[in-house]
Amino acid sequence: MNWSVNSKQGQSDDHAVSCPTTGHDGGDWAWEFLRRNADYVADWRSSVPQHLPCITLNDGTKLLRLRRRFPQAEKWGLYAFADPRLCAHLATAFWHANALKRVVRLNARKPNEAEANVRRLADFNAERHAVIGVDGVPLVVMKRNGVRVPLEIHGLSVVTAAFTPVYELHDLDDLTAQAELLRRLQRFTDADFRAVQRPSLAADERLQQALIALDESLKGKTYRQIAIAIFGEKKVTEEWHSHSQFLRDRTRRLVAKGTELMKGGYRGLLA
């Protein structure tokens, strides 16, 4: 696949066609909108280095270890820059813990032989991306079936080691949301892939439409052309000049939504 970043618009060619969004979670959607931002692309181009290599541990966890901070990347909510030429299926965007709405926090105690509640990261049946920043605290993102759970682990010096988890709860007004995040994490220990339920398909469809609207808008297309790309020529031909302004208004809203998400609203999609 031949990727190129348009220096003027800050987008790679034909995102919607080339990058399927099946299985995207909130972090994936956030990356799709951010990587189209021309200012982000400019910052990435001027960054040194532009790419930091991940290693794959014995248990399959992908690990990025940082020896220093990258303030320009942190400005965008990332630990380090990710390549905007790559879609979410190909790039690993390590979202900074401070940019996430909620994070499961736990203290990893050294397990005793008699303890039953002993875990390893490999016990979680999910794709695992871990980043260790300069503070030495691993942030592990579990991803599966369109669901992600970020896990901050204190006291785990070796990422693949066994540990006894002691979970922390913060802010009594947010207990319901924290409990739901813990339930999602627990479901990752279920061998049945179907046990982890996908988010609303309607939400995915709206984000997909906003992404297409954004791409077409960045190419300079008219609202009618954008509507055809989203809804098809037949529907647009039948409804564009009708008394109802629904299709026109919906197209305008989708362009506005896509632009808003690209310019910073993507942060609201992060878990």
Image (cartoon, rainbow, N blue to C red):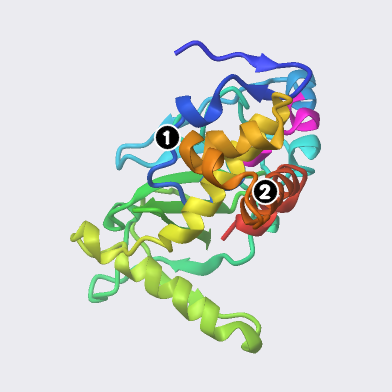
**What is the quadrant of the C terminus in the image?**
bottom right
Mark 1, residue position:
20
Disc 1 to disc 2, C-alpha distance: 26 Å
Nearer-the-camera pick, 148 or 206:
206
Nearer-the-camera pick, 168 or 100:
100
The mark lying in front, picked from 1 and 2, is: 2
Neighbour tally class for label 1: few under 14, some 14-19, many 20 plus, Cα within 10 Å: few
- The correct choice, above or below, for 157 with respect to 48 in the image is below
- Left or right, 215 with respect to 163, comes to right
Neighbour tally class for label 2: few under 14, some 14-19, many 20 plus, Cα within 10 Å: some
Image position, residue 72 (x, y; %) = 80, 36
**What is the quadrant of the N terminus in the image?**
top left
Q: Main secondary structure of the magenta part?
A: helix
* Magenta span of residues: 33-41
Image position, residue 185 (x, y; %) = 39, 66
Q: Residue at x 65, y 47 (%)?
A: 251
The kind of residue tagged 1 is: Pro
Nearer-the-camera pick, 99 or 84:
84
Q: Which mark is residue 248?
A: 2
Image position, residue 131 (x, y; %) = 55, 44
- The correct choice, above or below, for 63 with respect to 270 in the image is above
The kind of residue tagged 2 is: Arg
- Left or right, 194 with respect to 51, comes to left
Any part of residue 81 in sight: no
Q: Secondary structure at mark 2?
A: helix
Which numbered disc, 1 or 2, marks the residue that appears first in the sequence? 1
